[in-house]
Image (tube, coloured by chain):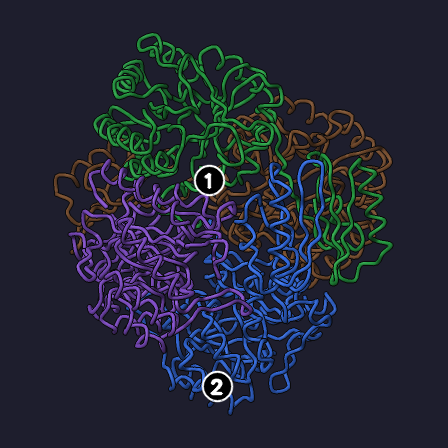
Chain colours: A green, B brown, C blue, D purple
Amino acid sequence: MIIKMKQAATKRQVEAIGRRVEAEGLEVQINVGQQRTVIGVFGDTSATDPQVFRILDGVEDVIRITSPFKMASRSFREEDTVVEVNGVKIGGKEIVVMAGPCAVESEEQIIQCARLVKKAGGKILRGGAFKPRSSPHAWRGLAEKGLKLLARAKEETGLPIVTEVLDSSQVLLVSQYADILQIGARNMQNFTLLEAVSQAGKPVLLKRGMAATPEEWLMAADYLLKQDKCGVILCERGIRTFSNVTRFTADVGAIPVVQEKSHLPVIGDPSHSAGYFGYVPALARAYIAAGASGLIIEIHPHPKKARCDGSQALTFSDFERLMGQLKAIASAIGREI
Amino acid sequence: MIIKMKQAATKRQVEAIGRRVEAEGLEVQINVGQQRTVIGVFGDTSATDPQVFRILDGVEDVIRITSPFKMASRSFREEDTVVEVNGVKIGGKEIVVMAGPCAVESEEQIIQCARLVKKAGGKILRGGAFKPRSSPHAWRGLAEKGLKLLARAKEETGLPIVTEVLDSSQVLLVSQYADILQIGARNMQNFTLLEAVSQAGKPVLLKRGMAATPEEWLMAADYLLKQDKCGVILCERGIRTFSNVTRFTADVGAIPVVQEKSHLPVIGDPSHSAGYFGYVPALARAYIAAGASGLIIEIHPHPKKARCDGSQALTFSDFERLMGQLKAIASAIGREI
Amino acid sequence: MIIKMKQAATKRQVEAIGRRVEAEGLEVQINVGQQRTVIGVFGDTSATDPQVFRILDGVEDVIRITSPFKMASRSFREEDTVVEVNGVKIGGKEIVVMAGPCAVESEEQIIQCARLVKKAGGKILRGGAFKPRSSPHAWRGLAEKGLKLLARAKEETGLPIVTEVLDSSQVLLVSQYADILQIGARNMQNFTLLEAVSQAGKPVLLKRGMAATPEEWLMAADYLLKQDKCGVILCERGIRTFSNVTRFTADVGAIPVVQEKSHLPVIGDPSHSAGYFGYVPALARAYIAAGASGLIIEIHPHPKKARCDGSQALTFSDFERLMGQLKAIASAIGREI
Amino acid sequence: MIIKMKQAATKRQVEAIGRRVEAEGLEVQINVGQQRTVIGVFGDTSATDPQVFRILDGVEDVIRITSPFKMASRSFREEDTVVEVNGVKIGGKEIVVMAGPCAVESEEQIIQCARLVKKAGGKILRGGAFKPRSSPHAWRGLAEKGLKLLARAKEETGLPIVTEVLDSSQVLLVSQYADILQIGARNMQNFTLLEAVSQAGKPVLLKRGMAATPEEWLMAADYLLKQDKCGVILCERGIRTFSNVTRFTADVGAIPVVQEKSHLPVIGDPSHSAGYFGYVPALARAYIAAGASGLIIEIHPHPKKARCDGSQALTFSDFERLMGQLKAIASAIGREI
């Protein structure tokens, strides 16, 4: 941490800060420049809020130097983490495609989807049983019945299941069916839920909040990693910006950034960022070309009849065509699907 | 809802859409323009996702015309809602100031704060017992002990209490102590929590999510209002933008907008938007001048020693000075504190 | 400037950086921490791009400590700058209201406006002769004829004129008529224009770009101040964010921030941030309550017939009512209009 | 255009609007719904500001239905436009890579770059002679001398030149040397410059403004296309958002959107969006995979010694490696470099 003093700061103020820093068990180094004094703070500052120094007399600004996340960082673990789910490895050389409907609607629908995913080379089946909805007037999914249908589809195809858990009270139930527990974007900073999920002993797919910086996202991952009981897969799904021609702005540039800062695998969600099936293939290809470890994609046998988010679901034939393109791109960059 | 057809759309496509709209129990009106056909959709569209029409053949775009929220809207209730808490009226002529520490730290701290709030003309005491923290390594509040201390401060001063509830499992506990249940910005779209809180029969302070549009905020209010068991107070607390000189960007312009669209009272939170005590008074005055029904402000007897967010807490003397300014502004615009 | 080395950085890399820094005529201070080395760079770094150090071997990040603007900063000049225009002082105790139509349309229109501005207590007349328009198909103002009409209105009322200059080729012409040259938001980083205007010897109203940080805004001011021939008035007019219920998001919190960082007067533009007359009064009051030194407001005798931006223009009676409120607020905070 | 009336709007107000619309030469269609009346406005509304109707009595909102740009739109021209520059075709099957240094610094530097670009398969040489700089204290390029050096490099390699023009006064000069005139992001809405450039009879590379919506970008293209004297190439270069881990947020999703709305070719600029050489290859690959017609990339023989933006420049070996990857991706999606 660097404490930048005001130009007019007195020697006494500098000393007072030195004492305050040492009281936190940290080390101080004082640099007296021509224009102003700058105080370096060293030691483990991860539990220290920089703001505590900001309001001390004579301080102009406090600048964090080490990252506020720990277990998720490359300094904590240098080599890439590979999360394994029923034999599927996420974070290695292979690119993993997860696909399925936004919401589970019926046995026929989810089984059709699962078969297609498998046939096309996808490795994990997605499908929502509990759906978070902006409007209280909207349909919210089949709940436990949806989970049972996912289990049926898994039985049929052998594909592991990723599905969302909305509240700490659902963790036990969902864990009985899911192979990966998904934390949605709106819950990325639902810390109670993060802690409950961290205890479940299952891999977690952690979506980035729509207004979350990579730092905040990795701090949320730290909540999950603190117990060291689960593997974490990060998922970029677009951020909220002034640009509203897509539903969210896919932050493709965050892929190499997060890979540099963290050892965790990161995948992309082109369906929620695009918000419209016509733009999904372009973003799916872009995430893969940028180096993502996988994708999560919405498909539906009849998007026009889907009970939710049909506008962003790919038809079966569009999905198969896209998988062909993705395989070609994967091999162009030395990976495989 | 307006469905805008592509220029090349065929008559057949238009008719197919007409049938689909009617199947949803809605009424259709077709306008054939020179360049393109535009289809008007009438009736109660609040449960209909515009996206279901977006992917039908021949459609270029779908534009919502009625708001997606209902109970929170001015069309549902024309006159201003006044929420009453132990005799304090929020949403009327009087401007209500809520103040207190970010987190309850000790009996002495919270009682000192409560006495000051009362003396300076504040009407409600705030104080966090359960603190949501971006980092899992940070301190999270005194939990139930904090609630008991809030009760002590209420006993002492008679001020009603507003405090945050983080998870549906805490609703019962917090309701025993709080007069107003606060939903934090990160939980604005935690729909499970919203539903649990809506059952508690207490007024709710609903903070705006940092990336929430006013529409989404009012849909979240609809979750609370659906049971018609609680009063809702909206709270603008800044949004996330590219501008990082304040912690968040106070969206003061949202005050008149929300007052036009909704009958609910809306207050401002200058502490979280500013993020620095030096900018809090300017934003507090601005929210009031813009017409907010109140404020929620963080204060601390010794900000430099605060266990959280001390940098945005006002000292007692700064708070008293600010209250004087706010009273003068209130009277300048025909209101009172 | 602080150069943060990677944890794995070698002593040799640190030394190489030391030499590179010294080659730029700057001073080096090396802090060897337990986890990593941090290099302090001292001296006049205003002409040094931090990025030149970012790519040196072993560097993880470079953090600027001193502001990249100079003449506009409080360190350059401690006391508030007061810009004087024909006897009107901007930046002092008095709050200065500038008002007038978006575009000058006719002699009658501009003279009616000027009389009202004067009567209601406004001190400066605004009116566009050259209008920047997003669409090439839109009307662009009366050009020199508009300037002549502004001169007529000034003759009639004595009010000084502020009007926009769009291109370096217009500076001479506009300077003959204007008392304050306005640089629009879209031209805030049109550096050729800034330099041309800086030579004209007239006060300049510098609007904030819709995506400009306060730092970039003050660097643009530095372009104007470099010749020391003109006074600069800053104008906050809203920024572009995801929130689209107002035309732009008025960044009211930037007022105290800029006042802290710079000695220049800063005023608010509630018309362009609101984009709708119904929201203008709330934002006008908010800017003043936050401490702005003035306002620039659009008015029109018949907004419904205005040739541009009529939707954000106040009618004469609305403007008079607002001026009454502003006077009351000014006196509530110890200032006057 | 759709005019949405307030629920309480009277028949008289609706009729008054009908007359006003017809007075603009447009056609009216009135839909009386159960809850509210909606007025459809048909005809050529491209020159009509929707705001003129917004403030009429009884109106709640006005919604544009046709796009505000014309010549740049797919409805104006259905097939893709291919811009040809000295035999290089931009917008066809081939993907065109433009590369070179941020600024021309010396004959040796620009000729080395040009040779590499040619050798690696790039088709156009970039290089700045006039540099826009946020700070007035920074170096601004070699001006005409830089243009002459570009001409030397063209002589040597045959590569056409793209270089930026900052002000209408420079158009003639720059046109003598450049094959493509570049409009920078900060000048996208410098309408005087757009008009001057539109007269020069040269292809134009139009960068997207950092806060520009695709609509505004295409309106800016309309300024260039109005004279029908130049070809326009659009260039996405990242937008300003809250996310600051990259210099700008590459809006890769805008590529398919703009291709749907416009017939103009669109390329990507991974250097300015990334802002750091380490992230450039990932974004370059992503833009191509998303379907961009080309790229503009910064390279430098010695990035560590570059006079500007060295941190985002690729070394020669990094550029060659990237070109190899791009060729493989191009062929994976059925295109070529």
Tell me what residue is drawn at x 27 percent, y 62 percent.
Answer: D18
Which corner quadrant of the image does residue D21 belong to? bottom left
For residue D60, side relative to residue B164 (left or right): left
Residue C136 horizontal/vertical position (percent):
30, 68
| Camera-nearest label, 1 or 2 | 1
The residue singled out by tag 2 in the image is C175
Residue D35 in sight in this render? no
The amino acid type found where label 2 is placed reads Ser
The residue singled out by tag 1 in the image is A254
The answer for which chain carries disc 1 is A
Residue B139 horizontal/vertical position (percent):
72, 31
Tell me what residue is drawn at x 65 percent, y 64 percent.
Answer: C44
Residue C267 horizontal/vertical position (percent):
59, 69
Tell me what residue is drawn at x 42 percent, y 22 percent.
Answer: A90
Which corner quadrant of the image does residue D211 belong to? bottom left
The answer for which chain carries disc 2 is C
Tag 1, which secondary structure?
helix
Q: How many marks?
A: 2
Q: Residue furthest top?
A: A155
Residue B13 in sight in this render? yes
For residue B165, side relative to residue B47 (left or right): right
Image height of D263 relative to B205, above or below:
below
Q: Residue furthest left?
A: B11
| Closest to the observer, D11 or A60 | A60
Mark 1 on the same chain as mark 2: no
